[in-house]
Amino acid sequence: MKKIKITQVKSGIDRPERQKLTLKALGLTKMNMSKEVEATPQILGMVNRVSHLVKVEEIA
């Protein structure tokens, strides 16, 4: 599987609860925090929900 690096670039403050919980499920709790995860359909769906709050990079 491909790996992706997800970085939170905008705050979850004043966002709907669902988006806050999605960020938490991705393991992102602070601004500019990054996580490397497998690019599964579940993870890609979560990233799609909060795409305006995160930056995604593919890892070779």
Image (tube, helix red, strand yellow):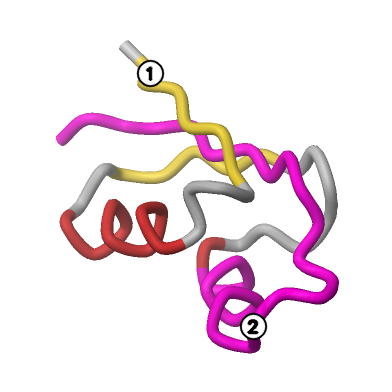
Side of 43 relative to 36 (left or right): left
Amino acid type of the residue tagged 2 in the rendering: Pro
Side of 5 relative to 21 (left or right): left
Query: Outermost residue, top direction?
Result: 60
Q: Which residue is mark 1?
A: 59
Q: Is residue 14 magenta?
A: yes
Q: Which residue is mark 2?
A: 16
User: Residue at 69% across / 45% down in the picture?
Assistant: 8
Query: Outermost residue, bottom direction?
Result: 17
Q: Is residue 24 magenta?
A: yes
Magenta range is 1-25
Q: Tag on residue 23?
A: none
**Residue 7 rendering spot, x and y as whole percentages:** 63, 38
Mark 2: which secondary structure? loop
Instruction: State which mark lies toward you, 1 or 2.
Output: 2
Side of 28 relative to 5 (left or right): right
User: Residue at 16% across / 57% down in the picture?
Assistant: 41
The N terminus is located in which quarter? Answer: top left
- Rendered image quadrant of residue 30: bottom right
Distance from disc 1 to disc 2, alpha carbons, whole Å, reads 30 Å
Q: Within 10 angstroms of label 2, few (less than 14), some, or many (20 or more) residues? A: few
Front-most of residues 54 and 59: 54
User: Residue at 57% across / 75% down in the picture?
Assistant: 19
Q: Is residue 47 above or below residue 36?
A: below
Q: Earlier in the sequence, mark 1 or mark 2?
A: 2
Q: Within 10 angstroms of label 1, few (less than 14), some, or many (20 or more) residues? A: few
Amino acid type of the residue tagged 1 in the rendering: Ile
**Residue 11 rendering spot, x and y as whole percentages:** 81, 57
Mark 1: which secondary structure? strand
Q: Are marks 1 and 2 in contact (CB under 8 Å)?
A: no
The C terminus is located in which quarter? Answer: top left
User: Residue at 80% across / 38% down in the picture?
Assistant: 32
